[in-house]
């Protein structure tokens, strides 16, 4: 995939590691349907700056609607920022993996996997040579040849995750995909991802599952109201992100979670 | 993405869509020729049996017009929604949005090849011999294809900008059905100046008339006029491809947030 105008050489980070991708003062807003938002303009990100270093897994946490998915789409070059700059290492391939989207529902899992691989720049022959591996790892069995519209969300996630994992992209952007599916596959996927990530692959990982973020990420960014609220090691950021426990009100009820 | 990858993707997407489409229907691939024939049957009943059209060999005349017009109208109607309907792939990578309408055109081309075979068989069966003029079919089909590509790209872009254009597109193809001489002969008008004007102003009317001239009268069409249409629509198609490329991320935002 070419990055067009967002491609540029990002300077190395302080510790000498290559910066794979950098957001510099990035804002993003769009005109939504008039009746949805005030004046029809929805501001999603507001002057966000962050760096993604080679070989790291950066976690992004935040409430629903905080701008996490938009941030991944900006990083993938699918959207252009309204203002600010996105710098990326020239030639670095990026793949965005998100739930629910990314597939053509009327096509089979096999055809979708083939299309995804081709969109990542593989020739048809190369893409075809990976299909059996994708079928086996995703454990979809017969369903691999059935239309994706018949899949459960777990099966969808398995197909999407496996396709992205087995086609070697430099920067893997993962949006909530590992938080669904059965526990067994989740564990297998986590292990596979750790294996890949220890091989120097760079990833951005958006998840509501704090346990997964802690296990997989080396650094975490907390996004709130379009701004970076905190950034640092997973333990510290997650502690700040988690609201302090509220004393149970008379009559019960659990404390609110973000 | 280089040109080879682009066309390989176009071809793959078109074939997959044809396969998925065929699997939905009981008669599968038979619909490729059955549907156009049913359209011809409907027009035949209305204009020959009910309205008592006195035109000689009306069925063949109608088939040449309708079977070639349907290639245009179905492609344009489908392609106009092609970007919107590909939200899954749009959300995955920054790819040129021309890929989707072009893949739809390709799908229509594969179907049309079987329709042309049927048409030629009907012509031969009805006593129309192959003449030297048939060589003109090659440039004519090419120009027809270029006109379809340009129209599909324009409509897909407009529908992406404002979805309401979908209504205009279907209305526009119905308008063209009436003014392009599908079930009436522009050469049969009492005023020759009116015939010239229609063939000059409506490129589709010229193309359909050219098919009839070649296949039914064995006469070569006006080559310069054909070249002019090909060059004009070729430039339009090229301009649209560039425009869709330049606005790729803006269109992604439109598709994913509308």
Image (cartoon, grey):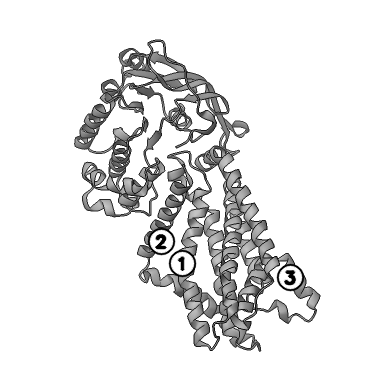
Residue picked out by circle 3: B198
Task: Answer whether labels 2 and 1 touch (C-beta < 8 Å).
Answer: yes
**Horizontal arrangement in the rendering, residue A130 relative to residue B214 (left or right):** left
Tell me which corner region of the image, top left, top right, bottom left or bottom right, holds residue B148. Answer: bottom right
Residue picked out by circle 2: B18
Q: Residue furthest front?
A: B132
Check disc 2 and report its element: helix, strand or loop.
helix
Q: Specify the subunit that label 2 lies on.
A: B
The tag earlier along the polypeptide, 2 or 1, is 2
The tag earlier along the polypeptide, 1 or 3, is 1
Residue located at (42% from left, 51% from top): B8
- Residue A27: x %, y % from top left: 54, 24
For the residues labelled 1 and 3, the Cα–Cα distance comes to 29 Å
Q: Specify the subunit that label 1 lies on.
A: B
**Horizontal arrangement in the rendering, residue A176 relative to residue A196 (left or right):** right
Q: Specify the subunit that label 3 lies on.
A: B
Residue A79, placed above or below residue B166 = above
For the residues labelled 2 and 3, the Cα–Cα distance comes to 35 Å
- Residue B40: x %, y % from top left: 54, 78
Residue picked out by circle 1: B111
Front residue (pair A250, A202): A202
For label 2, the crowd category at 10 Å Cα-Cα, with few meaning under 14, some 14 to 19 and many 20 or more, is some
Front residue (pair B56, A227): B56
Q: Quadrant of the C terminus of chain A?
A: top left
């Amino acid at each position: 995939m070419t990055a067009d105008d967002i491609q540029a050489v990002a300077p190395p980070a302080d510790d000498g590691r290559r910066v794979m991708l950098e957001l510099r003062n990035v804002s993003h807003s769009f005109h939504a349907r008039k009746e949805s938002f005030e004046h029809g303009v929805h501001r999603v990100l507001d002057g966000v700056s962050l760096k993604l270093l080679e070989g790291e897994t950066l976690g992004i946490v935040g409430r629903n609607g905080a701008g996490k998915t938009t941030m991944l789409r900006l990083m993938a070059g699918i959207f252009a920022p309204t203002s600010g700059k996105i710098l990326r290492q020239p030639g670095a391939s990026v793949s965005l993996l998100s739930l629910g989207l990314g597939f053509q529902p009327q096509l089979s899992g096999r055809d979708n996997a083939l299309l995804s691989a081709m969109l990542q720049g593989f020739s048809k022959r190369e893409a075809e040579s990976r299909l059996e591996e994708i079928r086996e790892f995703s454990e979809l069995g017969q369903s691999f040849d059935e239309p994706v519209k018949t899949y459960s969300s777990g099966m969808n996630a398995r197909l999407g995750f496996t396709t992205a994992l087995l086609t070697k992209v430099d920067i893997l952007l993962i949006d909530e995909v590992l938080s669904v599916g059965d526990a067994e596959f989740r564990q297998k996927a986590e292990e596979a991802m750790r294996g890949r990530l220890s091989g120097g692959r760079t990833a951005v990982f958006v998840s509501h599952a704090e346990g997964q973020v802690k296990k997989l990420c080396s650094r975490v960014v907390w996004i709130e109201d379009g701004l970076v609220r905190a950034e640092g090691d997973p333990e510290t950021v997650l502690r700040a992100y988690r609201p302090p426990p509220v004393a149970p009100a008379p009559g019960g009820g659990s404390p609110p979670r973000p | 993405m280089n040109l080879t990858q682009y066309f390989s993707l176009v071809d793959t997407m078109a074939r997959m869509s044809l396969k998925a489409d065929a699997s939905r229907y009981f008669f599968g691939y038979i619909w490729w020729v059955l549907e156009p024939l049913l359209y011809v049957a409907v027009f035949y009943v209305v204009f020959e049996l009910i309205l008592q059209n006195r035109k000689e060999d009306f069925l063949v005349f109608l088939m040449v017009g309708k079977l070639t017009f349907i290639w245009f109208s179905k492609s344009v109607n489908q392609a106009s929604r092609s970007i919107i309907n590909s939200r899954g792939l749009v959300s995955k990578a920054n790819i040129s949005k021309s890929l989707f309408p072009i893949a739809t055109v390709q799908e229509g081309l594969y179907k049309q090849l079987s329709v042309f075979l049927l048409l030629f068989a009907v012509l031969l069966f009805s006593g129309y011999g192959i003449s030297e003029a048939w060589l003109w079919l090659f440039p004519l089909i090419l120009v027809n294809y270029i006109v379809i590509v340009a129209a599909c790209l324009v409509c897909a872009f407009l529908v992406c900008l404002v979805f309401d254009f979908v209504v205009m597109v279907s209305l526009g193809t119905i308008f063209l059905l009436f003014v392009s001489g599908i079930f009436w002969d522009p050469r049969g008008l009492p005023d020759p100046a009116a015939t010239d004007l229609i063939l000059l102003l409506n490129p589709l009317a010229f193309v359909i008339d050219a098919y009839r001239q070649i296949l039914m009268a064995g006469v070569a069409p006006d080559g310069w006029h054909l070249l002019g249409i090909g060059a004009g629509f070729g430039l339009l198609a090229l301009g649209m491809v560039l425009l869709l490329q330049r606005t790729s991320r803006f269109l992604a935002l439109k598709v994913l947030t509308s």
